[in-house]
Each structure stands twice: as structure tokens, then as C-alpha cells.
Image: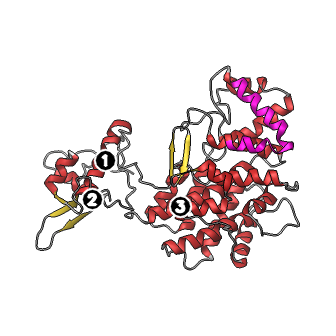
Amino acid sequence: MRDHESPAGLPGRRLTTKETAEVLGVKPETVYAYVSRGLLSSRREPGGRASTFEAEEVEALARRNRRDAAGTAGFGGDLSVRTRITLIEEDRYYFRGVDAAELAARHSYEEVAEWLWTGRPAPGAAFTAPGATVAVARHAASALSGHASPTDRLRVAAIAAAAEDPLRFDLSEAAVLSTGRILIPTLVAALPPALHGHGDDGPLARRLWTRLTGRPADDASLRVLDAALALLADHDLAASTLAVRVAASARAHVYAAVSAGLGVLEGPLHGAASGLAHRMLLDVLDRGTAVPVIADELRAGRRVPGLGHRLYTGEDPRARVLFGLLEEVPRAEPALLAARDVITTAARHTPLHANVDLALAVFTASCGMPATAGETIFAVARTAGWIAHALEEYGERPLRMRPSGHYVGARPPRPLPGQGGHPAGNHFE
């Protein structure tokens, strides 16, 4: 989506190739390389042979190039992404200009998802999926082996739901919103139930609870789960979200874009962090103290799970909200005390604050959930943000996210003077 106010105060002003090259500080040939890579758009004036370029777009590219030169030199291409979805600054984060922690405190996950997608309040928003779509997704997910992870099942369910939707290539806003409202409950319904005898109705948090633990739900615990879903719905351009935007830039349909996010999420450096924190807390509870557990982590050269976040100098605001809600859950007290022990013990070595993975671990460990539950919660929650980013990317130029490779490998042999083509004997066999 483009802003329409020209930096120079001249809306619609266009530059020649020479002027564009001067603004960007490059040769004219490089300007056309930018066009071929989708970083600039050109227009041929009626009756003329020369191309012109929109001044606003050229200025924006020049600013991004300056940022790249200052902070991301060596990557090549345009790695900045304009977005109106999430802002992170001063140890707080905002969804479309509204404090995300306050949104999660006052609204359900479904209402927060609608806000991310449309920027409009949606009181009482509820997501439901057609029975036929759920049946296909369940059948596909149930065909996986018992070793399959919940993320495996979610990814397969997304692909099955896509195959069931013949109109999946409709990328209009209305169609994508409709898909989002169907896909998220389909993903939840495709997970095998841990608590039987409960239908797939009611708030999404209640439906997800029955897939995570066989223990009955109480209002305080459901409030924590719903808040966790809302808080985790988006977090700017995490690795999985960037993968979603690349897929959407190539005009992959929204099911495929979400599948790209799920694929990245399953990496051990992204979605698995809460599982590591979960196992650590169980170890602390078993030993009765965090000291030997932290010592083992440090001796092995590993980071202590659940501590520190590169975007926050203080405590992760998501963790702060969840810890506050967990205080109202009586069965969470032992895990909360274990988490505080971890924070205090680790502080002797390095002053790191709790992040959302530690708070999720307190919740999953205290509610009888498996170590994979945090990743499942994260995946379901983040699907809302992925859909928001896909929607935003569909409004941009297609295939614009195309960084160029910085080749550092072997150079091809040069032909000897007078020879054409490749010198004899240099072919790969």
C-alpha cells in the first residue's frame, strides 16, 4: 500500500533515468537492474522512448539503500518491508497503533485477529469452519504417524483445506478474510482431542484447550490461553512472518502463505523455544531448585531457555501480561515459583529478563500439557498475524521481495584470447 504524499511536496512528479540515477547514487544501468528486480517501477511516456520514475518511489528506495548501507551491508537487495500492522518500540508493542497488551486484556483472540486484519473493531467475533473442510483436514492430519508433531498436523491440515477450496486463488480482501475466519478454526479442529466429550463450538481458546490437555478447563486458565493467543498473534517481521510475506509477494494463496510460516516456525531456533523452557521448568520442579539446572545449561554452552529477547531491553511485555494472569491460576503457583527461581539464579550470571517462552512454559507445565503445547499455541495464534501480513503484501507490487545474492563462489573460467565459449577441458563431467 502506497502513501500518496510526495516527499518533495510534488504529488505525481516523475524523474528521468539520469535524475533517478543521481538520486540513488548509481549508474543508469543499475536503475534498470532495480526495475528488473521489482524494486522500482518505470513508465514510458506517450510519444517518447525514455522511461520515467515516480519521485516518491525513488526517494523511498534511496532511503532504504542508505539504511542497508549503514546496517545491513553485504546482504544485497531491499530487506525493509513497509507495514502498518505491528510497531515495537521502547519495550512495548502495538497492533495498528493500539497497545497489544491492552488489546489482549480487553478482547478475545478472534477480536484481536479481526483488528489486525481490518483495523476495525469486531465485538463478539467468532470463527467457524464448514464441516466438509474440517472433515478433510482431520482426515489428512490423522493419516500422519504417531511421531508427527502438532506443527506437522497443522501444516498438513492447511494444505488439505486448500485443496478443498477451489477459489483459493482469489486474493481479494473479502476472500482472504473469509479464508482466515475458516482456516484458523480448521487448524484447531484438525488436532487430535486430548479431552473428549466437548464439541467444536464456543470461543477458539476453549476449543484449543481440549486439544492441549485432558484436564478440565477453568475460567482463569482459559483466560490465560485466550490472552496468550491474542498476545502472540503478531510480532512484526519474525522469520516465519518474513517467509509468509515472500510467499504472498509471489502471489501464493493464503493457505500456501500460512504453510510457509508453519514450515519456518518448526525450526529449532523459532517455534521450539517454549518447549525447551517447559522441559527446563519440569527439571527445576523435579530437583527442587534452579541452581543445578542453570549450571547444566551453562556448562553445556547453551543459552538459558525463556530468558532474553533481542527486541526488548527489559521484560518481554507478553511475559509480563501472562505472568500477571497466571497469578490468578492456583495450580500455576509451583511453576511460577520455579520460573522466578530460574530468573533469579540466571541473573547471577547475566542480567536477562523473562520472555514469553518462559511464561508459556509456566502455563503449559502447570496445566498438564505436553512440551509441544507452547509451539501449538504459538502456531495457531500467529496464523492471524500471517494472514494480516499476507493481506498487506497482496496490496504491494508482486515479486518485490527479491534480494540479490552476493556471489562468493568460484568464478567461471575466462576463455583464452581468440577463443569463443568455454575453454576445452573445463566442462563438469
Q: Is residue 143 magenta?
A: no
Q: Which residue is mark 1?
A: 426
Give the alpha-carbon distance from disc 3 to disc 2, as whole Å.
Answer: 27 Å
- Residue 388 marker: 3
Task: Tell me how far mark 1 sits from mark 2, CA to CA.
Answer: 35 Å
- Callout 2 crowding tier (Cα within 10 Å): few <14, some 14–19, many ≥20: some
Q: Coloring scheme of the render? A: secondary structure
Q: Amino acid at mark 3?
A: Ala
Q: Secondary structure at mark 3?
A: helix
Toward the viewer: 352 or 300?
352
Q: Which residue is mark 2?
A: 35
Question: Which residue range is magenta in the image?
Answer: 321-346
Is residue 329 magenta-colored? yes
At label 2, the amino acid type is Val
Q: Amino acid at mark 1?
A: Asn
Judge left or right: residue 198 versus residue 303: right
